[in-house]
Image (cartoon, rainbow, N blue to C red):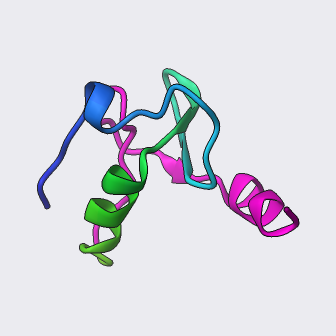
Amino acid sequence: MKLITGDEAESKTPTAYAVDCPDHGTVYMTPTCYDLQMDCPDAKWRCPRCGQVGEWNDAVFEASLDD
């Protein structure tokens, strides 16, 4: 998987795509970062700020569907 971090990966505003990082809490992804991570379905979710393994935040995604 091509891992990107920083401004290209982390959204400064909330999006429908977020990872819960053990160090940074909830971090929102840009659509580009989300697409790159989705291209590797067997890989673990990575924090867009630091690249550390995190957990997909399903509550953020589900809330975006209500809009």
Looking at the rendered image, the quarter that the C terminus falls into is bottom right
Compared across the picture, whether 40 is left or right of 35 comes to left
Say if 50 sits above or below 19 in the image.
above
Horizontal and vertical percent for residue 32? 32, 54
- How many numbered circles are shown? 0
Compared across the picture, whether 27 is left or right of 42 comes to right
The residue most toward the left is: 2
Say if 55 sits above or below 39 in the image.
above
Where residue 6 sits, quadrant-wise, is top left
Residue at figure coordinates x 39%, y 38% from the top left: 47
The stretch drawn in magenta includes residue 62 = yes
Question: Which residue is at the front of the view, 14 or 57?
Answer: 14
The residue most toward the top is: 23
> What kind of secondary structure does the magenta stretch mostly adopt?
loop
Q: Which residues are magenta?
A: 43-67
Residue at figure coordinates x 46%, y 44% from the top left: 29
Horizontal and vertical percent for residue 14? 64, 37
Compared across the picture, whether 57 is left or right of 55 comes to right
Residue at figure coordinates x 49%, y 21% from the top left: 23
The residue most toward the front is: 67
Looking at the rendered image, the quarter that the N terminus falls into is bottom left
Horizontal and vertical percent for residue 31? 42, 55
Residue at figure coordinates x 47%, y 34% from the top left: 11
Question: Which residue is at the front of the view, 17 or 55?
Answer: 17
Horizontal and vertical percent for residue 36? 26, 62
Say if 15 sits above or below 39 in the image.
above
